[in-house]
Amino acid sequence: MANHPEMGTSLPLVYHLLNVWMRVVTWLVPGVVQGRWRAEWDGELWYGVAANPQGTRVGTAVALAVGVLRDAIALRRLELSDGRRVRRRGDGIVRSFLSDVRHSLRTLRKAPGFTAIIVFTLSLGIGSTTAIFTVVNALMLNPLPFPDADRLVVLWQGRTGMEIEKDWFSPAQFVDIRDRNDVFEDVTLSVGGGVTMTGRGLPRELGYIRVTSSFFDMFGGTPTLGRLVDDGDDQGGAGMVAVLTHGLWQSAFGGEPDVVGQTITIAGSDFEIVGVLEPEFLLDDEIFPTVSAVGHIDLVLSMAMSEARMGNRGGENYNIFGKLEPGVTIEQAQAEMDGVAQYLTETYEDPGTGFFIQAVPLLDEVVGSVRQGLVVLLASVGVLLLIACGNVANLLLSRANARQRELGVRAAVGAGRGRLVRQLLTESTILALLGGGVGVGLAVAGVALLRRVQRSCSACCRRFACRASTWPT
Amino acid sequence: MQRITYPAACVLQALSKGRGYGFDIMEHTGLPSGTVYPLLRRFERSGLVRSGWETPEEAFGNRRPQRRNYQLTDKGREALARAAERYRQHLEIFDDAGPRTRPA
């Protein structure tokens, strides 16, 4: 404890305590004067405590303890205020950081192969992970840009006796479900398909979805121009109206502001254009799985709930979406649908068909088929990132071994352990930033590539939908 | 040259009286260690004092650690002279203030 080998055995406890305190406080003292400072206080404590034959007063011990601390703080302040005196710190912190950065850049420039391998490895790991996470985020974590998306449900019917697990509904079944449940705040009926639009230059293949007005109540959406489908359009005998998607408005109508009020002819029927949807509204086959598998929806058309349509029990081509009442669980909804299925079975179905209705959260419907694949993909690129990090760590370690001589020289000319660690950390940080920067670039390119692949896939679906299209009645 | 505070002047004065160790200065001036040692650091930085160590023989012969001692430099003596003059002038304010006793 003391700097004299013969001391220590008969010294009072307070001396040892103050010595421990002094050594604790030493970390405040600038490194290059620590040894001298400790030696001085060692002598002063001895003189103040151990050399006093009358015993140490508590006041003296406390005063010495405070003195040790204040002295250390004073030295630290002096160091910060006068870089020439002790070690260049204070403004020296920034200066030494910049010096580290410059030195690191020089070092990395001298080893271009090593730097390139590290940056490439890191960017590959970071880029692939970021790109796949972007996809996972869009498809799995936040796939439904609708209000209260967690309360949206898609209904399917099936007949176990006929080995039909997932089928669309008829309008009459929709009426039964709508009128015989207490779990849905709202239900909406829709049907989609592909059509040919004529009367505006060359005929054009379009995807459409016909909806009741509650569709927009449920999924949100605001018009850029005019209005959306409203209650009046649901009434039997109401004129047929069309709402253009923003994309169709731009591509087929040149973004004309006076498009509202014009008439378009679709599959031989005239529809009055009443509005244009906002560009952000998401309409695709993943979310609205129409019977004709329309990949891309260009038009939203009204669907009057005439007596004839509401009595149609044979045309099972319609989607039913529901929005759960707040607080209602999917299990409660399923139980309610089981009751409706029971009623329909007893009333309309042949015995033994095994008719059932299934309520599926829309989120599960959209991501259910890809969830496992995406999770596996995300885990794979996560492992790739781990491997990349492991490789980089190994490379840095082997390089550090090769640089022992350089580090030894730096230590010999006065660089402390902290300074050397800071230097290596600065180098690693620069490499990480370079890898991250290139990785983000790779991620942007990767996402763009995935979008292109996704678009070409959608185009396939759309062509298929157009060939198979039939106009529902 | 920064102004010398009263405690600083006391420490310089103690040094001029040959009190060269931190603990001795504390005892001589009645100033706490938290004042004395930081002042010594500043004085040393400003060149008012210089420090040294007693010889190992002297310290270890007495079975104790070496102590660091401080001595005034010429610059320090000049500073002490200026400070002493200033504080002497300050004390003159009280010369006609009557006896410095607490009223009964």
Image: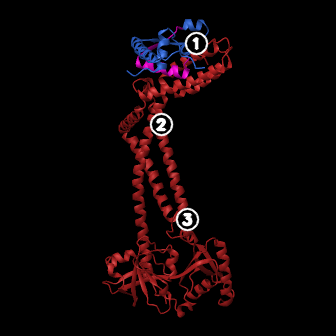
Chain colours: A red, B blue
Give yes or no for residue B32 being in the magenta stretch: yes
- CB under 8 Å between callouts 3 and 1? no
Q: Quadrant of residue A369?
A: bottom right
Question: Callout 1: residue from which chain?
Answer: B
Question: Callout 3: residue from which chain?
Answer: A
Range shown magenta:
B30-55
Question: Callout 2: residue from which chain?
Answer: A
Residue type pointed to by label 1: Pro
Residue B78: x and y in percent read 39, 13
Residue A426: x and y in percent read 43, 38
Q: Which mark is residue B65?
A: 1
Give the secondary structure at mark 1: loop
Front position in the image: A128 or A414: A414
Q: Is residue A431 above or below residue A220?
A: above
Marks 3 and 2 belong to one chain: yes
Q: Which mark is residue A56?
A: none
Which residue does the numbered mark 2 point to in the structure image?
A: A398
Taking the spot 61% from the left edge, 83% from the top edge, the residue there is A177
